[in-house]
Amino acid sequence: MNKNANIIEIFSSIQGEGPYIGYRQIFIRFAGCNLSCDYCDTPFQAQEFCNIQKTESSEKLKNPVSVEQLLKEISNFNKISHHSISLTGGEPLLHTDFLLDFLSDFRKNFPKTKVYLETNGTLFEELEKIIDYIDIISMDLKLKSSTGIDFPFEQHKKFIEIARDCHVGTKVPPRNDNFEIFAKAVITSKISDEEIEELSDFIKIPLILQPVSSDNKEILLSSRDILEIQEKFLKKLGDVRVIPQVHKFLDLL
Ligand code: SF4
């Protein structure tokens, strides 16, 4: 078992995407990713040190970080109330051996703080290993029109199937009463009707559309385009919301 993980940074900030926008979280950014999206601006390469970002200062921790060290850092941040820890990356599901140990101890030490997983929604076998410890999954859908990579249809499909096995409202009894999953997709003017059809046919979970924005924080889709795209999804899906990525506008990490 690997009880250490290469972590890029740990910091306290607000969630800037999706239905949990504004909640205060402790973010744990894991190194490494299994995809290479065109628009990626996330620093996820493994580093010698993990940055601990405090409001007024920063510290460094030698990588790889142990479960005990991570729990200690979280307890330092948790002196103010946080809604959840956000496991992010890169792709945090590349670290499931570490996460199994860490989340088991985390639950015992911080029973009231939720576990929020931010994932690219492709590593379904890894999800299955740790899903009992997860309260909320924020899953990206990697549309070819925005990522430049082939749409990982089969991986996304299996990922949602595994997650829905414990989703409240499905026929299978939930393993975790608090469990929730939603999907996010960055949309651009290049999105095609075929992509919308393909997506609408298999995702039966809430969908958040994120209009693409430029480096200088300008939304690159007209309001008419955004409404038209949402309407096309709403023909087949019941819960489709448009929520831009607000952390960019607030200059938050
Ligand atoms: S999945 Fe996320 S972290 Fe990985 S390349 Fe794509 S945008 Fe970057």
Image (cartoon, rainbow, N blue to C red):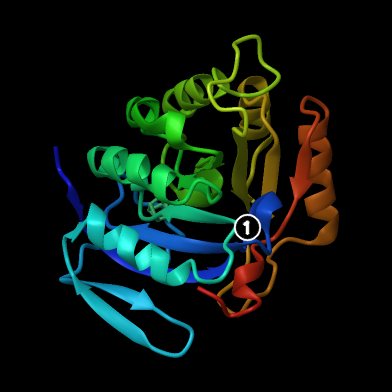
Work out whether 251 lies above or below 241: below
Location of mark 1 (residue): 17
Q: Which residue shows up at 33% across the image and 58% down it? A: 71
Work out whether 192 lies above or below 116: above
Work out whether 53 lies above or below 191: below
Closer to us: 78 or 228: 78
- Residue 18 falls left or right of residue 51: right
- Quick one: label 1, few (<14), some, or many (20+) residues within 10 Å? some
Residue type, mark 1 in image: Glu
Closer to us: 162 or 77: 77
* Quarter of the image where the N terminus is located: top left
Q: Position of residue 143 (x, y in %)?
A: 53, 41
Where residue 97 sits, quadrant-wise, is: top left
Q: Position of residue 20 (x, y in %)?
A: 67, 54
View extreme (top): residue: 171
Q: Which residue shows up at 48% across the image and 37% down it? A: 134
Taking the image as drawn, is residue 43 in sight? no
Q: Which residue shows up at 63% across the image and 26% down it? A: 203
- Residue 151 falls left or right of residue 168: left
Badge count: 1
Closer to us: 67 or 8: 67
Q: Position of residue 208 (x, y in %)?
A: 69, 45
Work out whether 87 lies above or below 212: above
Q: Position of residue 94 (x, y in %)?
A: 28, 42
View extreme (bottom): residue: 56
Does the Cβ of the disc 1 residue fall within 8 Å of ligand 1? no
- Residue 253 falls left or right of residue 6: right
- Residue 76 falls left or right of residue 167: left
Taking the image as drawn, is residue 68 in sight? yes
Badge 1 element: loop
